[in-house]
Amino acid sequence: MQASGMVKGLTHQYGDPLQYFLQLGDETLPLNHVLGEQIRLQFTGEIECVYCGRKIKKTYNNGSCYVCFKKRPENDMCIVKPSLCHFDEGTCRDETFGEQHCMIPHYVYLALSSDVKVGLTRKNNELKRWADQGAIKAIPIAEVPNRKTAGELELALADYLPDKTNWRKMLKGEFNDVDLKQVRDDVLEFVPESFKHYVLTEEEIVQFTYPILEAVGQIKSYNLDKQPKIEDRLIGIKGQYLLFTNGVINMKKYCGYHVQAKVVSTGG
């Protein structure tokens, strides 16, 4: 394996286990078959905005330059807090984007990664969303007509369940296994009356297996700004993280960075 280009993050294909790929520019590098091998990631020092291609010194929100961070719809506050969607107020940063990504059916779901959390995602995007979060299993509990409604229901249920993942516990595989359907039944008791007609009760649990050779020890994050060259044995992939013997790296964080990737030797 050898390639170079702008980091676009990790993609996957659903399977047992998930099949992972590193996106570098126009190249797609399969990762599962190089587990156990010594990998070198070399940051060239060049960064560009993933949206406009402008050369920049730092990124905002996973790959944006400052201008795109302030203007692009993907970086609006309502992406982080969907209940604040302002599409109907006529102030959406990009109405076409809003129509295609926000004003469409969404799932509100339960997912187990570190703990059971409540979240939301576009319908037909759920497998990507759950895998990117490192979920072990997940289940939709409501289907709503748009992102704002999903955000409002998520906010109502966040009083009873967390809406964030403990990434350290997720990477270590530390979790309390639960009957997710029972949790769903318990949580549905707290759904406000105005959302009851969106509730799903017959959906099946989706389970995920990640390509991991061995358990991660102490969690240490590699930082390409401070350590431009990483050379370590790849032992697993989970969410958007590459797991090495001596550290982990969140590839999504470095979208826009130009990186050279190479297998330098077998892990033995």
Image (cartoon, grey):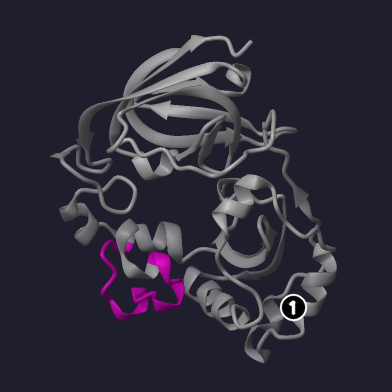
- Residue shown at 28% from the left, 40% from the top: 50
Provide residue 129's location: percent of width, then percent of height.
Answer: 57, 51
- Looking at the image, is 191 positioned above or below residue 120? below
Query: Which image quarter holds the C terminus?
Result: top right
- Looking at the image, is 79 positioned above or below residue 88? above
- Mark 1 = which residue? 187
Q: Nearer the viewer, residue 172 or 100?
A: 172
Kind of residue at badge 1: Val
Q: How many marks?
A: 1
Dividing the picture into quarters, in which one does residue 56 lie? top left
Stretch in magenta: 79-95
- Residue shown at 61% from the left, 21% from the top: 35
Q: Is residue 88 magenta?
A: yes
Provide residue 20's location: percent of width, then percent of height.
Answer: 58, 30
Provide residue 205's location: percent of width, then percent of height.
Answer: 79, 55
Q: Nearer the viewer, residue 205 or 238?
A: 238
- Looking at the image, is 254 positioned above or below residue 231? below
Provide residue 212's location: percent of width, then percent of height.
Answer: 67, 32
- Residue shown at 44% from the left, 64% from the top: 102
Dividing the picture into quarters, in which one does residue 161 lie? bottom right
Any part of residue 106 in sight: no
164 relative position to 49: left or right:
right
188 relative position to 165: left or right:
right
Q: Is mark 1 on a helix, strand or loop?
A: helix
227 relative position to 109: left or right:
left
- Sort mark 1 into few (<14), some (14-19) or many (20+) by Cα contacts within 10 Å: some
